[in-house]
Amino acid sequence: MADGRLCVRLLFALATSCARPEPVSPNVLPTPPPTRETPASSPSPAPREDLQVGYATWYGARFAGRRTANGERFDPNAMTAAHRTLPFGTWVEVRRVDTGESVRVRITDRGPWGHEDRIIDLSRAAARALRIVHEGLTKVSLRVVTGP
């Protein structure tokens, strides 16, 4: 049984490694070249490398249980989000521009659709953590991170 799972994972990895990269949205800033790391004793934090700045919206119970674009079932209580172009499974730090509060979410769906200034749809749990449920629309910055 374990060998079968390993075989399926290997086949999936091979199949997805040959896939074309997803197109990049024109409002995504190019990634700057890597810089030298500062010594651990340096008191100043590393500069932020924001991917996008725009508005976050959220979606919740109405979509609960429906399949997302990556095939998972949407759970409004999970820390997930929809983005137009980032690969599924990408972890993103979403930071409120006005308060500096941030959460990390995993991209599982496509959206938001409509206005180009809306760059991410958050799950209800992520919106609650950022305290934007009542506001509905909040200016944020996005940064790709390595995990939760």
Image (cartoon, rainbow, N blue to C red):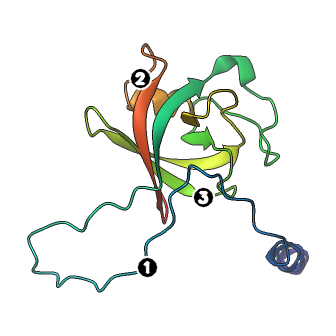
Q: x and y percent of residue 73 in the render?
A: 77, 37
Q: Which mark is residue 51?
A: none
The amino acid beneath tag 2 is Ile
Circle 2 crowding by C-alpha within 10 Å: few under 14, some 14–19, many from 20: some
Residue annotated with mark 1: 33
The amino acid beneath tag 1 is Pro
Query: Spatial distance from mark 1 to mark 3, Cα to Cα?
Result: 20 Å
Q: x and y percent of residue 102 in the render?
A: 35, 42
Front-most of residues 37 and 68? 37
Q: Which mark is residue 90?
A: 3
Reply above or below: 11 against 25: below
Quick check: 84 left or right of 144?
right
Front-most of residues 89 and 34? 34
Instruction: Please report whichever mark, 1 or 3, sits nearer to the chain's N-terminal start.
Output: 1
The amino acid beneath tag 3 is Thr
Residue annotated with mark 2: 132
